[in-house]
Image (cartoon, helix red, strand yellow):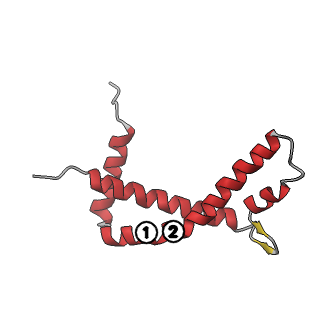
């Protein structure tokens, strides 16, 4: 017999297990999320906007005029070259925001025990 388990049920069980084993302090989790979110807005927006704009330049065959967008997209900001660490920081920050957001969301949605 096959068991049908939804993704929500799996995530809910993981959140309960995390809550039981780690006793995640909600205040500290919100503090981490709320302090990291404003820091990550600018790099993520830069990555998003330069990536989309460069794809539009490729579609309109204007890559020569807008090659600088690709440079900014990969982490070269004028004389500051962050190509080796910029993607890692972007990914680590986004991953942390996603994980903390999901944990807070699952804790909020957990049914109250009576």
66, 20: nearer the viewer:
66
Furthest residue in direction right, as rendered: 64
The x and y percentages for residue 108 are 28, 55
The x and y percentages for residue 60 are 82, 40
The quadrant of the picture occupied by the N terminus is top left
> Distance from label 1 to label 2 (Cα)?
7 Å
Left or right of residue 114, residue 52 in this image = right
Callout 1: SS: helix
Left or right of residue 95, residue 60 in this image = right
Which residue: 76% across, 44% down?
Answer: 56
27, 55: nearer the viewer:
55
Residue 72 lies in what quarter of the image? bottom right
Number of the label disc, if any, that sits on residue 34: 1
In the displayed structure, would residue 7 be above or below residue 33?
above
Furthest residue in direction bottom, as rendered: 79
Furthest residue in direction left, as rendered: 114
Which residue: 33% across, 59% down?
Answer: 18
Contact, mark 1 vs mark 2 (Cβ under 8 Å)? yes
Callout 2: SS: helix
Q: Write down the residue under mark 2.
A: 38
The x and y percentages for residue 113 are 14, 52
Left or right of residue 76, residue 35 in this image = left
Which residue: 36% across, 44% down?
Answer: 10
In the displayed structure, would residue 81 be above or below residue 71?
below
The x and y percentages for residue 30 are 37, 68
Which residue: 51% across, 68% down?
Answer: 38
| Any part of residue 7 in sight | yes
């Amino acid at each position: 017999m096959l068991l049908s388990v939804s993704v929500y049920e799996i995530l809910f069980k993981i959140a309960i297990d995390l809550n039981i084993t780690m006793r995640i302090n909600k205040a500290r989790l919100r503090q981490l999320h709320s302090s990291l979110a404003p820091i990550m807005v600018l790099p993520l927006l830069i990555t998003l906007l330069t990536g989309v704009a460069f794809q539009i330049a490729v579609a309109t065959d204007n890559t020569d005029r807008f090659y600088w967008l690709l440079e900014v997209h990969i982490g070269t900001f004028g004389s500051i070259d962050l190509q080796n660490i910029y993607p890692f920081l972007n990914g680590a920050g986004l991953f942390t925001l996603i994980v903390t957001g999901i944990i807070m969301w699952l804790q909020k949605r957990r049914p109250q025990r009576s």
